[in-house]
Amino acid sequence: MNPSIGLRPYLPQDAALLVAIFIASIEELAADDYSVDQIAAWTAPADDVVQFGARLAGQLSLVASVDGEPVGFASCKGVDQIDMLYVHPLVARQGVATTLCDALEKLALARGAKHVNVDASDCAEPFFLQRGYSAQRRNTIDLEGVWLGNTTMRKPLAANDPAPPAP
Ligand SMILES: CC(C)(COP(=O)(O)OP(=O)(O)OC[C@H]1O[C@@H](n2cnc3c(N)ncnc32)[C@H](O)[C@@H]1OP(=O)(O)O)[C@@H](O)C(=O)NCCC(=O)NCCS
């Protein structure tokens, strides 16, 4: 775990930099799990920085930094749905996503959520599994005619709300 990881809320001026992190993260960290066409479809929202920024501004979005430089970000849709989680490949496996998810889960609990859900990419599934999320169902999503697989996963936040058994 990198001890110098900082966290702050998303700011509108972050959008262009976070788009660059989004692209680098997918192109490098997801390349073993998804085809070139799938990666192109997944990164397509980066073409519209304004809309990308609006998506983050409309959610509870956090930016992680190392030495003051943004290196990753995460967002929560509603009170309990992790929407985006992307870490720059140069700082992968240093605890950046852990720091972001620790904060999002604490905030979700504080906002009354009993559990947190995520549609996890195949490359993110081991990350969520080791955090106590369990697979609920397999999805195949259509991104402009390109099909991508992911897995809906859930983590209970309160001891009295166990995750339902996987089908
Ligand atoms: C998944 C992702 C967010 C993880 O970010 P990260 O900052 O590297 O994760 P952390 O360093 O906090 O990882 C914590 C633990 O999760 C597990 N983990 C993380 N990435 C893993 C991987 N690729 N394979 C297996 N286990 C992994 C490990 O147990 C790791 O601990 P360790 O490094 O001590 O072994 C990052 O790989 C990423 O951005 N991937 C591409 C985009 C993506 O798929 N986003 C998710 C959309 S739902």
Image (spheres, rainbow, N blue to C red):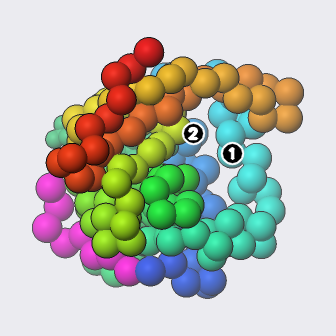
Image point (61%, 24%), residue name: 139
**In the figure, is residue 6 to the left or right of 9?**
left
Q: What residue did someone put label 1 on?
A: 43
Say few, some or many: other residues with alpha carbon within 10 Å of mark 1 (under 14 / 14 to 19 / 20 or more).
Answer: some
Q: Amino acid at mark 1?
A: Thr
What range of the chain is rendered magenta?
A: 1-8
Residue 14, quarter of the rendered image: bottom right
Image point (79%, 57%), residue name: 47
User: Mark 1 and 2 residues: CB-CB less than 8 Å, in contact?
Assistant: yes
**In the figure, is residue 135 to the left or right of 23?**
left
Residue 16 in view = no
Query: In the depicted view, which residue is nearer to us: 136 or 63?
Result: 136
User: Earlier along the polypeptide chain: callout 1 or callout 2?
Assistant: 2
Q: Residue furthest right?
A: 145
Query: Which x, y percent locates residue 91?
Result: 32, 54
**In the figure, is residue 3 to the left or right of 51?**
left
Query: Which x, y percent locates residue 107?
Result: 34, 70
- Magenta highlight on residue 7: yes
Q: Secondary structure at mark 2?
A: helix
Query: Which x, y percent locates residue 95?
Result: 23, 54
Image point (32%, 42%), residue name: 155
Q: What residue did someone put label 2 on?
A: 27
- Nearer the observer: mark 1 or 2; the answer is 1
Alpha carbons under labels 1 and 2: distance apart: 8 Å
Residue 67 tag number: none
Quadrant where the N terminus sits is bottom left
